Each structure stands twice: as structure tokens, then as C-alpha cells.
Amino acid sequence: MAQIEIGKALLDDVREFIDQKWMHSECELCDTDRWMIFPEPTTHVYLPIGDESAPPRAYYAQPMGAFIPVSCVNCGNLRLIDARIFEKWRREKGEAEK
């Protein structure tokens, strides 16, 4: 039951973040303004971080960045929210509510 409440709080926060931060929340592909957030099985996706001048890192660990995936309900267009920026916003929001 506690996990359900945590998941609901995350979804509510992501929706509030989008409402506050995205000037144009319409999908750039289909103009729909409805987005899905995937809290299960994981809240974040991890992608390798690097630039084209860095050598391929096939034999050792790459630095990774965490992102929150948000998908258009109409066409499936995917947007990623940088988890560091989102978590900073959440902390500041929590402090302001105290």
C-alpha cells in the first residue's frame, strides 16, 4: 500500500512539473496534450553520457544519466525529463511547502 502512495505522489509531481516547466506541452508530432508516465517497473531510464569525441567504451563502464520517460498517449512520442533537474525541483517544492 505504501508503494502505491509513493507511485501516486511521483505521478502527481511529474504532472505538476510538466504543468510548471513546459511552456508548450503539446506533442510536437501530433499536437495532443496528453502524456503517460511510466512508474512501473522503474521510474527512471538510464542512458550513457558522452560526446562524439570520446572513444567508444565497449570494455569499461560508461557514465550514465537518469531520465524520467514521458510518452504521448496518441502517437507514442517519447520525451525524457532529466531526473537531476526533476529531483532538484521536488526538493525545492518540498522546502517551500514547509
Image (spheres, rainbow, N blue to C red):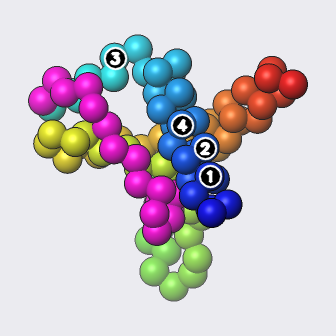
Instruction: Write down the residue under mark 1.
Output: 5
Residue reaching furthest to the bottom? 59
Say whether disc 3 or disc 4 marks the residue closer to the N-terminus. Answer: 4
* Distance from the alpha carbon under mark 2 to that under mark 1: 6 Å
Q: Which mark is residue 12?
A: 4
- The secondary structure that dominates the magenta segment is loop
Instruction: Write down the residue under mark 2.
Output: 9
Instruction: Write down the residue under mark 3.
Output: 24
Q: Position of residue 74 (x, y in %)?
A: 15, 40
Confirm or deny contact between disc 1 and disc 3 (CB under 8 A): no
Q: Which mark is residue 83?
A: none
Confirm or deny contact between disc 2 and disc 1 (CB under 8 A): yes
Q: Could you tell me which residue is drawn at 51 percent across and 43 percent down?
A: 11
What type is the residue that disc 3 sits on? His
Q: Residues within 10 Å of mark 2 (few under 14, many from 20)?
A: few
- Extent of the magenta region: 30-49
What type is the residue that disc 2 sits on? Ala
Q: Is residue 33 left or right of residue 6?
A: left
Vertical arrangement, residue 94 with respect to residue 61, above or below:
above
* Distance from the alpha carbon under mark 4 to that under mark 1: 10 Å
Nearer the observer: mark 3 or 2; the answer is: 2
